[in-house]
Image (cartoon, helix red, strand yellow):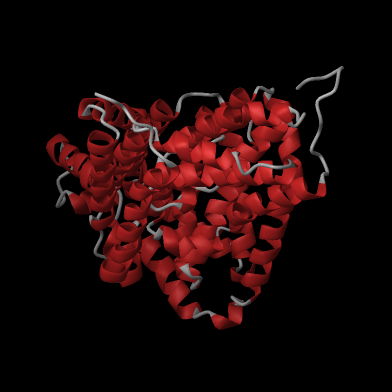
Amino acid sequence: MHKREPSFLVSLIPVAVLVLLLTGNVIVFKDDSSVGPNQLALLISSMVCAAIGVFYLKRPYKDFEKKALHSVSVSTQAILILMIVGSLIGVWILNGVVPTMIYYGIKLISPEAFLPISLVICGVVSVATGSSWSTAGTVGIALIGIGKTLGIPEGMVAGAIVSGAYFGDKMSPLSDTTNLAPAMAGTDLFSHIRHMIFTTGPAIIISFIIFLVLGISYSSEALNDTQIQEVMGVIAKNFNISLWLFLLPLIVVVLVMKKVPAVPALFIGTVLGVVFALIFQQDLLLRLTAGELNFNNLYHVILKVSFAGFEIESGNAMIDKLFSRGGMSGMMNTVWMILMAMIFGGMMEATGMLTTIANSILKLVKGTTSLVTATIGSGIFLNLTTSDQYIAIVVTGRMFKSAYEKFGLKPKNLSRAVEDGSTVTSVLVPWNTCGAYFSTILGVATTAYLPFAFFNLLSPLCSIAVAASGKTMEKIDDEQTS
């Protein structure tokens, strides 16, 4: 059987089908498009890709399926983290950690300064932990709650959280993506981090200023102080609020800083969360167990919160919506999305369509600016098609390495462009593992926070602007080659 290679136009067919289906889903299902329709769109597009591979490219279907299943296996860790975080959120609401963080956040943070403060808090935590995911799953959910109470739009708050979390993740030596990018490009970690300052610095400064300006419109006078006091009163009535509870997220942050892998660190945080619940929330547990604190009742409540999430009926609709969440089952829709997305990415790679599209992009490169633009564009494209930032980083880094050498540019120019294109844009794609994770954890649709994720939107633009100026685009010389 004669095998064909896919042309550029043929390679775009599955992508075009996916875009059409996703657009149709948004029109027909609106906000519900991510709870089934988009998953089916990814599966249908995968089958279109496979059909082209079998009937046009003349290749056996089993090869495509094997690659797709391998692609799914790559996402296993992300799925495992997602499931554990689901349990962690439920348990951390039960033990009072999240309610305490929200209570003191409402009490101490002024509305007009809330958005820039959220940006800074998430940036600091993410630099310390090297994980945007851990940042979103801990302080992120608390900040969403505070923002709701202060009357600030959820999309805006989530945009500040995403911006801060990805700035910290990108600049932290503990981050896996920050280590992966220079490894693929052929430079060292700290040269890579120092070189990113020239594009990351302007992006985060501009983002901070924008959030500062946006925050001015949410002055104290515009808020209903009675409603805020009511919310704080309901929280204090239903949970034991204690500063000691801040010790738990601090322990998790320290574990991650000590380079404990994400899965065991989050699992330890969940187990310790149960211990904290038994110590600090005995009155709440007494109500949930109908007045009988025996082993069977406690076991039932704790496991139900872990797999089905926490539920509360406080009489206050805002509090009930805010705290009735978490649990492994609440993550299943996102898991479904990740599985379908990875199958589509695997099919595109197995048929050679991704390679064809990448080679077509490389043909358009004529100079330094177009090279950096192509690098960033490829990272964004791979986030859209493979649905995984790690694949986007690896493929883009390998694909453009020889091109940067040809133009006499040091590898750290490539690693910076890879991060500016691949890392920060992954969270802006609803069906990417990062976009699906953040929208689920924060309870805010990706399309709702995307316009306010200023750092993530500005980073690629700043990178291209720096390339166009020629500044910091360091050349290879005889003394130093990396």
Q: Quadrant of the N terminus?
A: top left
Q: Quadrant of the C terminus?
A: top right
Residue 145 visible in rendering: no
Q: Quadrant of residue 36?
A: bottom left
123 up-or-down from 481: above or below: below
Q: Nearer the viewer, residue 326 or 180?
A: 180
Q: Nearer the viewer, residue 163 or 6?
A: 6
Q: Quadrant of residue 420?
A: top right
Residue 162 visible in rendering: yes
| Residue drawn at x 69%, y 23% as measured from the top left | 187
400 up-or-down from 201: above or below: above
| Residue drawn at x 20%, y 52% as measured from the top left | 288
465 up-or-down from 79: above or below: below
In the rendering, at what x and y percent does residue 164 appear? Answer: 59, 50
Q: Is residue 226 left or right of residue 320?
A: right
Q: Nearer the viewer, residue 63 or 341?
A: 63
| Residue drawn at x 60%, y 63% as measured from the top left | 115
Number of numbered discs overlaid on the protein picture: 0
In the rendering, at what x and y percent does residue 428 appear? Answer: 48, 53
Q: Nearer the viewer, residue 289 or 223?
A: 223
In the rendering, at what x and y percent does residue 208 appear? Answer: 68, 59
Q: Quadrant of residue 408?
A: top right
Please identify the residue farthest to the top as the structure is shown: 479
In the rendering, at what x and y percent does residue 441 appear? Answer: 38, 50
